[in-house]
Image (spheres, coloured by chain):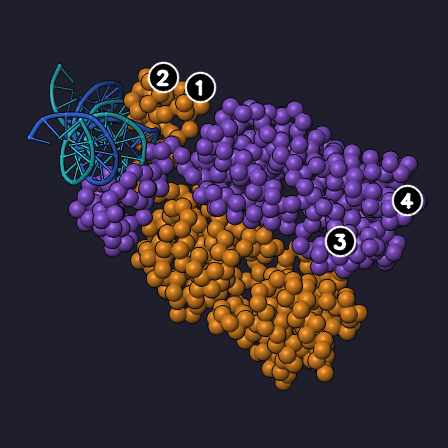
Chain colours: A purple, B orange, C blue, D cyan
Amino acid sequence: MAARLKDVAALAGVSVRTVSNVVSNAAAVAPATRARVMAAVEELGYRPNLAARNLRQGRTGLIGVAVPEIHSPYFGALTGLLIDAAQERGWTVLLERTGGRAELERRLLDGSEGHQVDGMIISPWSTPPAGLASLAGGLPLVVLGELDPHGSIDHVALDNVAAARDAARHLVAAGRRRVAAIGLQSALGHGTAELRADGFRQGLAEAGLAPVAEVEVADLHREEGTRALRELLLLPERPDAVFCFSDELALGALRACGEQGVRVPEDLALAGFDDIEDGRFSTPSLTTVSPDLAQIAERAVQCLSERVLGRLAELPARRIVVPHRLLVRESSGA
Amino acid sequence: MAARLKDVAALAGVSVRTVSNVVSNAAAVAPATRARVMAAVEELGYRPNLAARNLRQGRTGLIGVAVPEIHSPYFGALTGLLIDAAQERGWTVLLERTGGRAELERRLLDGSEGHQVDGMIISPWSTPPAGLASLAGGLPLVVLGELDPHGSIDHVALDNVAAARDAARHLVAAGRRRVAAIGLQSALGHGTAELRADGFRQGLAEAGLAPVAEVEVADLHREEGTRALRELLLLPERPDAVFCFSDELALGALRACGEQGVRVPEDLALAGFDDIEDGRFSTPSLTTVSPDLAQIAERAVQCLSERVLGRLAELPARRIVVPHRLLVRESSGA
DNA sequence: CACGTTGTTTGCAACGTTGCAATATGGGGG
DNA sequence: CCCCCATATTGCAACGTTGCAAACAACGTG
């Protein structure tokens, strides 16, 4: 059915090996021969069989990208950029959704689940960074989203502590004194939420303040933001500012404010984290910490690419910090 | 490095072929032998080499899903569900973003771009349905999102005409008389927008009304919604209701209303299309047409699966219509 | 004119798996 | 007790490609 090297070779009157040299640019081929082969390729509509190529070369050209979910604005944007960055380097991305389940994260890494990939970019949720390296067992791996100070794997992330501190400083500078946070996840016992909480407290402490409340959440989606804000409004002393660890939480909180007649930013200042598109179009628009997602994607793919191609084989783990910016918009009373 | 059938066979003291039979359940194997082989598999951590398997079987186990973009709420949700549905049937999804570019859609279909896949689910943007079949050239294909009445390919979609008619009827029933639409795309000359415009006009015509305005857009995102609504507010006779062909357009429009002091739904009723999550949490929450995305994904994968496995080979193209519901929420003055 | 050199082209084997067909094993019926 | 059949296991070849090393041609040099 589909044309093979053999068919092209027969038509062009050369050996199979020469056709292979032409299509994969492996060795020097005389211009006249090349032209003849290309014509035959064109005529037969030849496409290399990747399964065979992969089998022979021991590489699949696929890299796995494992994220907790792809339908959320944040991960949707991130995976889109990862796909772009990978394509630019000739890789194809195989997207895996972990749903935050530790079991699935494990199975993806140890290879018992999913297709064969040459390497993996993972945004872990349930698995502590320390455990990832051993699980991967030789599979090149790049971890996104949290910085493990002592890890032995490549990491790409922003400085969560500094970013949260910036947000807290901003709320204080805007004259707020009763500041709360939404988004802690002590059940996980590690990871991004911890870091943001630390930074948040530091930012307040610099002004001699302490959080008036810190609300735990089950996930970072809107529902939880709505629920958490309602909870905050029941406090004897209502906060006048809330820092949410994600924009989705903040948008959920904004919804709760609307329901309860709390004016934003007059009665309550809101800040989020992630700079998702919805936050630019909400009313009021959302103050947020904006990570440089494009750079995260770019660096992650580059780093993984080098590992897979074996160049970095012996180098120690890299810890790549990408910049972030605080975008002050209407929700914090610009 | 990685264990192969040969290694497992040596350890278990059986032939390579028997190990293959065990791991792929191809033929009957005596319980005792099976146990011995499984033990060896376990000990060596054997994983089948998919490249080899694919080469031998001529199938990759991959299905391509090509959508214009994955970071938008609508396509993000859809692709997530497609991945689920595929996984359930043992397929792995390879996600491709076309960006709505006809050239890329073409290259994906004719196989010159991307990895090898056994079949493809495509949500076309620039390529008219009629052209898809010839491009695919034998590659099993399922088209999402628009119904081509005369096509020769499998389609899965909702009834766009009926859905838009429902929305228009609802606005009229809510007492609105000056109804406009946002979201036409006459540049494409075909497709979803046309169908929704038809249904919209039908719904108004039933009440003896005609659209007071129909605004063209370049895409279905928020910016365009904002721009389009500003445009509508400049009309001598302002509309009292607007039907947007996507929720993102509607949310952009909502933002414009906030900026201009237009109260929703008091001054202006808004309805959208897609039922994205943001619309549930906006203030006011968004009235919308909710397609049964889970069913779209389920049916699409099922249909493609049958084509790939050759069962439907000779059957004519199927046209699958999935149900939708109109969700009336705050933005249309429930 | 013989010889080394460079540049092109080729044949063979192997990557790890499974389809096919043939061979071993065990059990029941004649 | 022998033969046949069903069940279990095996060997061989092939899927389409590329690494390797050898063969070949053309050319300039001593």
**Given this view, does label 3 or label 2 mark the residue nearer the observer?**
3
Image position of A5 (left or right of B23): left
Q: Are marks 4 and 3 on the same chain?
A: yes
Q: Are marks 2 and 1 on the same chain?
A: yes
Q: What distance separates the C-alpha of mark 3 from that of mark 2?
A: 62 Å
**Upstream in the sequence, badge 2 or badge 1?**
2
Identify residue for label 3.
A286
Q: Secondary structure at mark 1?
A: helix
Q: Which quadrant of the figure has residue B331? A: bottom right
Instruction: Assess disc 1: are there few (<14), some (14-19) or many (≥20) residues with their C-alpha within 10 Å of its C-alpha.
Output: few
Whether labels 3 and 2 belong to a single chain: the reply is: no
**Amino acid at the residue labelled 1:** Glu
Q: Residue B43: which disc?
A: 1
As helix, strand or loop, the secondary structure at mark 4 comes to: loop
Question: In this figure, which residue is indicated by the disc labeled 2?
Answer: B11
Protein chain holding label 1 = B
Of the two numbered discs 1 and 4 in the rendering, the one whose residue sits closer to the viewer = 4
Task: Measure the alpha-carbon separation of dots 1 and 4.
Answer: 61 Å
Pointer 3: residues within 10 angstroms few (<14), some, or many (20+)?
many
Q: Nearer the viewer, mark 1 or mark 3?
A: 3
Lower position in the chain sequence, tag 4 or tag 3: 4
